Amino acid sequence: MKSRLRILLAAVSLLLSILPSPAVAGSAKVRQGVKQVAARQYKKALKSFRDAVRKDPDDAEAMTRIGDLYASGQGVPRSDEEAVRWYAKAAPLGNAAARFELASRYASGRGVGKDPGAAAKWCRLAADQGHPGAQSLLGFLYEQGMGVTRDPEASLAWYRKAAEGGDVAAQKLLAWRCLEGNGVPKDAAAAAAWYRKAAEAGDPGAQARLAGMYRDGIGVPKEPVEAAKWFREAAEKGNAEAFAGYGRALLYGRGVAQDESAAADWIRKAASLGVPEGVFLRGVLYAYGRGEPKADAEALDWFRKSAEEGYVDGQLQIAGMYLTGRGAPPSDNTAAAWYLRAAEAGSPDAQVMLGWMYEVGRGVPKDLGESARWFRLAAARGNTVAREHLEYLETPR
């Protein structure tokens, strides 16, 4: 719970450090300060906002803007305590952004003593005013029972309001829930729709997820061009998973012109950050001499790193190398062990290979019953080779 709250509030803080509060019809000094913030003239903006407060001691918008500057350390030393002081002045005057900021700090204990009750109070006021961030936070508070009675239905309702109001965090959360069937009916198409909203708002994480759905045909038709486009957008914004996804697209020319040199660059970036797909693809580069010198030992090393992180394609590659003795000492037992890990993770290709190994007694004791069991699992996932083997095993002779 604590880690999720930290992530949510950190995301909010990051957005606030980049974007000013939504512009409103404030005083001339506030409007001047907003323009100065946009021009990164933060010290001048601070003076404009302070002038606005001196002219009108109840100017809640100016107070909130000053709090934003202290929260992000723009034009002044960063200070959560000072930010809270200004938000606390503006919140009772009805400013929704200040109420949300105050709520988030009471929830996390940043700059003020942690107080779930106060967090829920200010959050509800801002949420009722239609503030999407507050609606998203209120959904979280109801989900966790922080300052309010735990209520999954109310939580979901507030998340939906936030998502419909454009809150990216809520859109991504709903997408994930629809994809996993967590608290809502499993619906890949709805998941893709929510990821698209967040992706179109510029969120690189959502762009990478949407790209993967287009690549694999989950909730949307398989569209390599769409996949490559979204992977590229996310990668150019620094998303590590997208480094691997876009590198794969370039490597195989899927949805984009093939470019092995550029592919290798993106894959190296992903691998250096420990992204399992990137680590696996680094092995592919060495295994086939594409963007790297051909080197089976290097390939095996990278495949093993990804396999140990649970990456199924890496497990399949290692199993195949031990089975054939390419780049690894021949070992049917080791091959069977890696096929078993991939098969248990649900890979039909691994299930077929394990079924065959039990059928012929290679790396495992010969056991036609166990062989048929693995073939059935693979066949249920649409594997035609498994069906053929199963028919052969079940045909009376």
Image (tube, rainbow, N blue to C red):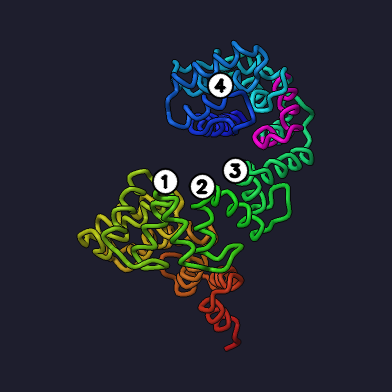
Mark 4 Cα shell of 10 Å, populated few (<14), some (14-19), many (≥20): some
At a point 22% along the width and 60% down the height, the residue shown is 295
Residue type indicated by callout 3: Val
The answer to which of marks 1 and 2 sits earlier in the sequence is: 2
Residue topped by disc 4: 29
Residue topped by disc 1: 237
Q: Secondary structure at mark 3?
A: helix
| Residue 1 x, y percent position in the rendering | 63, 31
Residue type indicated by callout 4: Lys
The answer to which of marks 3 and 1 sits earlier in the sequence is: 3
The answer to which of marks 4 and 1 sits earlier in the sequence is: 4
Q: Secondary structure at mark 1?
A: loop
Residue topped by disc 2: 202
- Note whether residue 354 is visible: no
Q: Which residues are magenta?
A: 118-136
Q: Secondary structure at mark 2?
A: loop
Q: Out of 73 and 150, give the one closest to the viewer.
A: 73
Q: Is residue 74 magenta?
A: no
Residue type indicated by callout 2: Gly
Residue topped by disc 3: 168
Residue 306 lies left or right of residue 372; in this view the side is left
Q: Nearer the viewer, mark 4 or mark 2?
A: 4
Q: Residue furthest front?
A: 28
CA gap between label 4 and label 3 equals 31 Å
- Note whether residue 22 is visible: yes
Determine the main secondary structure of the stretch shown in magenta. helix
CA gap between label 3 and label 2 equals 9 Å
The answer to which of marks 3 and 2 sits earlier in the sequence is: 3
Q: Secondary structure at mark 4?
A: helix
183 to 260, vertically: above or below: above
Q: Out of 328 and 171, give the one closest to the viewer.
A: 171
Count of marks placed on residues? 4
